[in-house]
Amino acid sequence: MSFNNLDTLYRQVIMDHYKNPRNKGVIEGDVLTVDMNNPTCGDRIQLQLQVEEGIVQEAKFDGEGCSISMASASMMTQAVKGKKIDDALEMSELFSKMMLGEDVDMDKLSLEDIEALQGVAKFPARIKCATLAWKAMEKGVNEE
Amino acid sequence: MDVKAIRQQFPILQQEVNGHPLVYLDSSATSQKPASVIDAVNNYYREDNSNVHRGVHTLGTRATEKYEGAREKVRRFINAKSTAEIIFTRGTTTAINTVASSYGQANLEPGDEVVITQMEHHSNIIPWQQVVKKTGATLKYIPLQDDGTVSMEDVKKTVTSNTKIVAITHVSNVLGTINPITDIAKVAHDQGAVLLVDGAQGAPHMQVDVQKMDCDFYAFSGHKMCGPTGIGVLYGKKELLEKMEPVEFGGEMIDFVNLYDSTWKELPWKFEGGTPIIAGAIGLGAAIDFLNEVGMDNILEHEHKLADYAMKQMRTIDGISIFGPEERAALVTFNLDDVHPHDTATALDAEGIAVRAGHHCAQPLMRWLDVTATARASFYLYNTEEDVDRLVDGLLKTKEFFGNVF
C-alpha cells in the first residue's frame, strides 16, 4: 500500500511526541510568552520561556495543531531547555536548513529526537507546521 | 449527464498523483478547467490580444467584442436586466470590498447596522468590519441553528429598521448550507436595507436568477466555476450602482479628465479602473458556455445525488464527525477522531486524493463549531461515485495508519 511513504513523515518518535507531548503546559509567573499561529491552517501555539542570565531555564508550550506542529513544539522545548540563547537560535537556524532539505550535522548541536522530522522536508505543504514552534522561540528570544 | 465524457474534457484530471489516478475533491477552493476554457484564453493571447475600448485597429475591435461578449454571457447566466449591471472584478473578495468601500462608506453612519451571519467566509466579514469601524456603524450577526442553518425568525429578529446592509452567503463553503436568499431579501427590503449575496459557492453549482432572488448585489468568482483565476463578477442593481462612487481611479474608467477634477464613464466601466481583466473575462465566458452546455440544472441534480451518496458512505466510517445540515450543497466537511485534519489530508494525498484541510477562511465559524480546523471534500460536475468510494477507502486507511502508529 502506498501509505508506506507516509512512514518517512510520520516516524514513531514524532507520533510519540504528539501523543505524549513533553513540556506541555503553562509556566506560572511573569515569563516570556509568545503567541503564534499559522494563519493558513489555524494551528496555534503559546510558548513560554523562562530565561535567566542568557540561558533558557524552562520552556513550555500550549496550543492546538496537527501531529507535526505539536510534536515539533514538544521536541523544540526539550532541545532548547538548558541551552544558551545563542545556541538555541543556532539550533533554530539548523532546523530551518533541515526543513529545506540541506545536509545538517546532527551531532553538532544535539538535536536529539528532532532528527526524526527530517522527512518533513519531502512534504513542502507541511514545513510550516514543523517550523511554527521554532519561529515562536526565535520571536521570543529576539524580543528578550 | 455523461460524467465520463465531461471528465475527458478536463486535461488535469487525466493524471496520476503519488502513483494513483487523481481524485480531485477541492473544487470549493478552486475548480478545474475544461480544455475549452484553456483554449479560449490561449487563443485570445495568440490571435486577438489587444487593449479594449481604445485604438481603432482590428485587434482592438476583436478584443473589445470578445470582452464585452463575455459580459453579455454573464448577464444571461445570472439573468440580470442589463450588462450595465455586470462589473468584472478580480474575484468575489474584490466585488464585496467594492460594495463595502463604495456603498457602505457612503450610506452608513453611527446608529446604522450591517447584518451578516457567523457562517460567512472572511471575505464577507472583514470588509464589513472595516467599513463599520470607519463609519461608526454596528456589525451584527444572525445566529446559527444547531445544524448550521439560519432561521427566518432569527433573520427577522436581527434585521431592524436601523439595518442598512445585509450580507450573506448563498452557500456556505464549510457547512454546505444553502440560504433562503429570496426570503431574506424580502426581510431586508421591508426594513429598507439592501442585500448583498456572496455567491462564490452558489453561482458555480446552481441556476442563479438575480431578478427572482431580488438581491441588490451578487458577487462571484470565475475560478470556482471552471473559469480562470483573477476574474470575478459584481452584479448590482443599476439604480444602486449609478449612485455609487468608483473605488479605483484611472485607466478604463475615466470619461473626461481635467487638471483638478474628472468625470467617470457610465456603467459598468465606471468600476473597471485600469486595463481590464480581458483574458480572464473571455475565459469566464468560455466557462459559462461550457456550463450551459452541460446545463446548470443537470449539474445541480448530479451534485445533489453525489452529496447524498457521500454523506451515506462517509457516515459508515466509525469515529467521523460531519458538520452542517442534512440538506446541503455538494461538499462534506468532516473530522476523524484523533487524527488532525492536516494529517488526514496528507494521508489522503498519498492516495492521490486532494481534499482541503484548515479553517477554510472561516475562523469565526470554526469557533462556533468548536474546532480549530476541519477537512473538507467538495465535489463538482466532474466527480463520480467512484471518487467518493476512493475517499472512503482512503479515510479507512488513514484511520488504520494513525491507529497503528499510536
Image (cartoon, coloured by chain):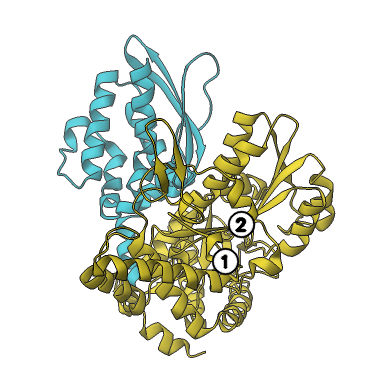
Chain colours: A cyan, B yellow
Q: CA distance from mark 1 to mark 2?
A: 8 Å
Taking the image as drawn, is residue B81 in sight?
A: yes
Question: At label 2, which amino acid type do we have?
Answer: Lys
Q: Position of residue B254 (x, y in %)?
A: 41, 46
Of marks 1 and 2, which one's residue comes earlier in the chain?
1
Badge number at residue B238: 2
Q: Position of residue A41 (x, y in %)?
A: 46, 47
From the viewer's perspective, tell me whether residue B311 is left or right of residue A30. right
Q: Chain of mark 1?
A: B
Mark 1 burial class by Cα count in 10 Å: few <14, some 14-19, many 20+ = some
Q: Position of residue A48 (x, y in %)?
A: 46, 24
Q: Position of residue B95 (x, y in %)?
A: 52, 52
Badge number at residue A25: none
Quarter of the figure with residue B197: bottom right
Total numbered labels: 2
Residue at 55 percent of width and 40 percent of height: B101
Please state which of residues A94 and B309 is positioned toward the viewer in this rendering: B309
Residue at 44 percent of width and 48 percent of height: A67
Vertical relation: A32 (above or below) B77: above
Residue at 38 percent of width and 43 percent of height: B250
Q: Chain of mark 2?
A: B
Vertical relation: B393 (above or below) B138: below
Please state which of residues B352 and B63 is positioned toward the viewer in this rendering: B63
- Look at the numbered disc 2 and give the secondary structure of its residue: helix
- Look at the numbered disc 1 and give the secondary structure of its residue: loop
From the viewer's perspective, tell me whether residue A13 is left or right of residue A100. right
Please state which of residues B168 and B318 is positioned toward the viewer in this rendering: B168
Instruction: Report if the CB atoms under discs 1 and 2 are less than 8 Å apart.
Output: yes
Residue at 75 percent of width and 55 percent of height: B146
**Residue with the mark numbered 1:** B82
Question: At label 1, which amino acid type do we have?
Answer: Ser
